[in-house]
Amino acid sequence: MLITLAGLIVGTAGTLSMAVGAYMSTKAQRDIRETMLSKIDIELENLNMEDRTKRVKDALNKMGIDEKTASEIAPPSLSTDINISKKITEVSEVGLSEEALESLEGQPYTRAYFT
């Protein structure tokens, strides 16, 4: 009886420990990505049009679009609209846009629950 109770206590403690660890890990990853996205937003808002165009071209190149095509599409449409520039740069540099992070609301709780 005492051994069974001790086993249950140890099992419960291990489960809770893993759940808290998964929650904290996911929350930390989310905080890091949110900080990176905020940094990109601030940087792009403070860039002049020429530098923003270069940044968008670099982001498009990083996503697999060749230099010539990126040079054709970046200046007229993407660089002038700050929101489009932000989305392209965010996806290229961070891997997720702000909308993708918002769709993951509550995910730390879900991961911790299913651990």
Image (cartoon, rainbow, N blue to C red):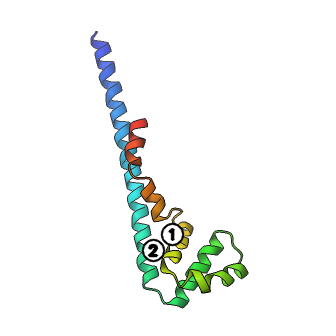
Image location (x, y in percent) of residue 89: 53, 73
The residue pinned by badge 1 equals 90
SS of the residue under disc 1? helix
Question: Which quadrant of the figure contains the N terminus?
Answer: top left
Of marks 2 and 1, which one's residue comes earlier in the chain? 2
Question: Does residue 96 appear left or right of residue 46 in this picture?
Answer: right
Name the outermost residue toward the top: 1
Q: Residue at point 44% right, 68% down?
A: 37
Q: Secondary structure at mark 2?
A: helix
> How many numbered circles does the render carry?
2
From the viewer's perspective, is residue 15 above or below residue 57?
A: above
The quarter of the picture where residue 61 lies is bottom right
For the point 61% across and 80% down, the residue is 57
Q: Kindly indicate whether the residue at mark 1 contacts the one at mark 2 (C-beta within 8 angstroms).
A: yes
Query: How far apart, in angstroms, are the residues tagged by discs 2 and 1?
Result: 7 Å
Residue 31 in picture, x, y percent from top left:
38, 59
Residue at 45% x, 74% y is: 40
User: Which numbered disc covers residue 40?
Assistant: 2
The picture places residue 10, in percent across and down from the top left corner, at 32, 25
- The C terminus lies in quadrant: top left
Q: Relative to 9, does residue 29 appear above or below in the rendering?
A: below
The residue lying toward the viewer, choosing from 21 and 83, is: 83
What amino acid does circle 2 point to? Ile
Residue in the picture at 39% in, 47% down: 108
Between 40 and 2, the one lying in front of the other is 40
Residue 67's disc number: none
User: Is residue 115 among what the camera can see?
Assistant: no
Q: Residues within 10 Å of mark 1 (few under 14, many from 20)?
A: many
State whether residue 109 is above or below residue 5. below
